[in-house]
Each structure stands twice: as C-alpha cells, then as structure tokens.
Image (cartoon, coloured by chain):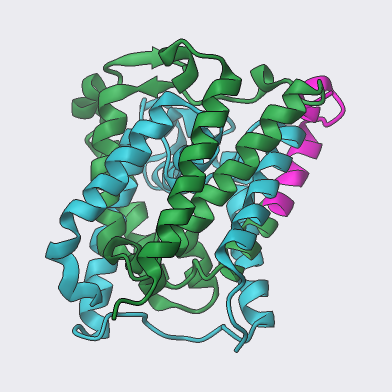
Amino acid sequence: MKRYTDPYLAGVGIGLVLLAAYVLVGRGLGASGAFASVVATGTAAVQGTARAAAAPATAPYLQQGLTSMFGDWLVLELAGVIAGGFVSAWLAGRTRRAIEHGPRIDGRQRMYAAVAGGVLMGFGAKLARGCTSGQALTGGALLSAGSWIFIATCFATGYTLAPLARRLWR
Amino acid sequence: MSPLSETGVLGPAGVLLVAPLIGFAFGWFLERGGLGDARKLAGQFYFTDLTVFKVLFSALLTAMLGAFWLDQFGLLDLDLVYLPETFVLPQAAGGVLFGAGFLMGGLCPGTSCVAAAAGRIDGFGIIGGMLLGVAAFNVLFDWIAPFYESTPLGAVTLTDMAGISRGAGVALVTVVALGGFAAAARLERPRP
C-alpha cells in the first residue's frame, strides 16, 4: 500500500482541476447537486414525471424529464469522481472492502452514524445550496459571500460538537 | 479568452464531455491526498490530522490566485464564471447542519463517493443517508421554502460587501491561508 500524497500537493492538484473547470466550462466542482439530481429522477420514476416536474423542489432537475440526470453536468462529473477515486485507490493498493471506524465503536454503530451524518449533510447541503465542493471550494475560491458563510458555520459547528462525538472517532 | 463554454469554442456536447474528465481528476487527487479515509477526515475536528484544512485551502488558494491572474491577463473573464447566489440565513443554517453531519459521518458528499469507490462500506452509508436527507428536504419543501428563499443578497462576493478591490481580497485571503498553514504545522507537531 502506497503512502498518501502530501496534502498540499493534492490540494494544488485539486486547485488546478477547479481552475480548469472555470476556464473550460465557466463553473466549478460539485457533489451534492448530483445527489439532488439523482433523487429528483428517482422521485419522478416513482411519482410519475409530470407530477415531479411540476413540484418546485424537483422541477429544476427535471427539465428533460427522466433522462435529465444523464445530461446533468454534475452527475457526469460525480461519475468521473467515482472512477478517478477508484483508479487512484486501485493503483495505490488501497482498495479494500471494509468499514472504517473509531477504536471504541463497532462497524454496525459506525454505519448508523454514517447514515445519520449523511442525512444531516444531504439536508444541510440543500439548504445551503451546495456542499464542501460546490460552496466551500468552488464558491470560496470565487470569494462568494454565501460560500464563506457556509465555510464558517460548517467548521464552527464541527469543532463545537467534536467533544460530544469523541466516542465515534477517538 | 475563456470560459470556453461562453465564447462558443466548447458547445453543449463538449461541455458534457469535459464533465467526467474534470471529475476523474478531482476524484484522483482526493484519493491521492487521503480524503477517502473517514478517520483521517475526522481527525480534522480533533487537531490530530489537518489534511482536510491543508487540501481544502491549498486548492482554494490555487484556484483563487489562478483565476485572479488569468482574469488580470485577459485570458479568463471572471464575470462569466458562475458565481453562486448568497442567501445569508439558509446558508448559515445549512452550514450548521452540514458541519454536524460531517462530524458524525467523517466524510463529505464528494469524499464519500471516493471512499465507496475504494470499497469502504461506510462511504455507501453516507451516500444512502445523503439521498434520504435530500428526499426529506424535498418532501418538506413547502414548509422550508420561505426560509430557503429568505435573506437573499444576489451573486455577491466578500470584496463587494467590504467595498474593497478583488485584488485586495485575494491578497487578504492568501495571507490568512498562509498563516493557517503555518499554524497547522505547529498544531500537528506531536506534543511531549
């Protein structure tokens, strides 16, 4: 198993990728938007496309009906993230079927915490109109005011609650 | 001159073709930097591993400085790059919920995909939770909408708000980030 790249080097790499996105397509990176697109497509499949496309929460993601997801820039980008993450991990010998968890909890408790954390992040990212990729990184580098508000409250909350979540990680 | 999507060099099909390539490189560097490992990310909140801070802010700095100078040299028109709109209260509240979830889950939306791609089951747990959280938001949207649309400021930057030039803002963020990197090096030094 190879060692990880120096974080500053990886960061500069990501920064250049983000810069390339600004230059090529006039937008940045994202992740939660792709999740929103997938959920909208799922909703349309269950409820019927007409109903989901008329609902204000899902309408923006269903401009081309059920096929919208496959023409969504963020969905295609996130598919690339998964592929890139896999190839990198595989070449470094880091692919492994496992549940990463702290020393004081078991895999099952970790999975509950992971799902709960995911729910909070999904809801929070919708409210904030983006996540660590779309707001903190992409908007942050453009000095967007809302992005920096998001960065501030996100990390302030993480550090404030960290002592309470100690059992999960330490 | 760029963005190429705005100058007509890159058509709609070209824009979509670029998406997975950009994503691949993003996922590659996230994994290389160790951001597919939940315990490593959670270490950020206990000052034992500041990888998240280092990667996030060195990436932000690189893109910010790159975009600023390309704009200065007339190679990129920053006014044509999509700037997200600001909604003060919903974004502050969203950050609070997201921060709590990030602490519990140890991975963010993008890095959970990297973790899952490398075989980490907890990454799939985050992905499942994210989908549920977004669905819950959609179900409750009628109630949330007034708050979601509240306190709009438009597509505004920190430098617009402070009434200083973009260059001054870029310089300020650079100095603060470099100070943060120096502090991170001290914080991580093993205590006796």
Q: Position of residue B56 (x, y in %)?
A: 50, 51
Tell me the residue at 22%/23% (across/down): B147
Magenta-colored stretch includes residue A76: no
User: B146 left or right of A82?
Assistant: left
Tell me the residue at 27%/60% (across/down): B103
Q: Position of residue A93 (x, y in %)?
A: 62, 87
Q: Residue furthest top?
A: B163
Give the chain letter for green.
Answer: B
Position of the N terminus of chain B by quadrant: top right
Mark yes or no: residue A58 visible: no
Tell me the residue at 69%/81% (across/down): A91
Q: Position of residue B64 (x, y in %)?
A: 61, 35
Magenta segment, principal secondary structure?
Answer: helix
Give the chain letter for cyan.
Answer: A
User: A90 left or right of B160?
Assistant: right
Q: Position of residue B93 (x, y in %)?
A: 23, 35
Q: Say how many tags the image has.
A: 0
In this view, A138 is above or below B148: below
Tell me the residue at 36%/80% (across/down): A100
Q: Residue furthest bottom?
A: A1
User: B59 left or right of B86?
Assistant: right
Residue interval drawn in magenta: B1-22
As rendered, which of A78 and A133 lies closer to the eye?
A133
In this view, B38 is above or below B174: below
In this view, B75 is above or below A104: above
As rendered, which of B12 and B111 lies closer to the eye?
B111
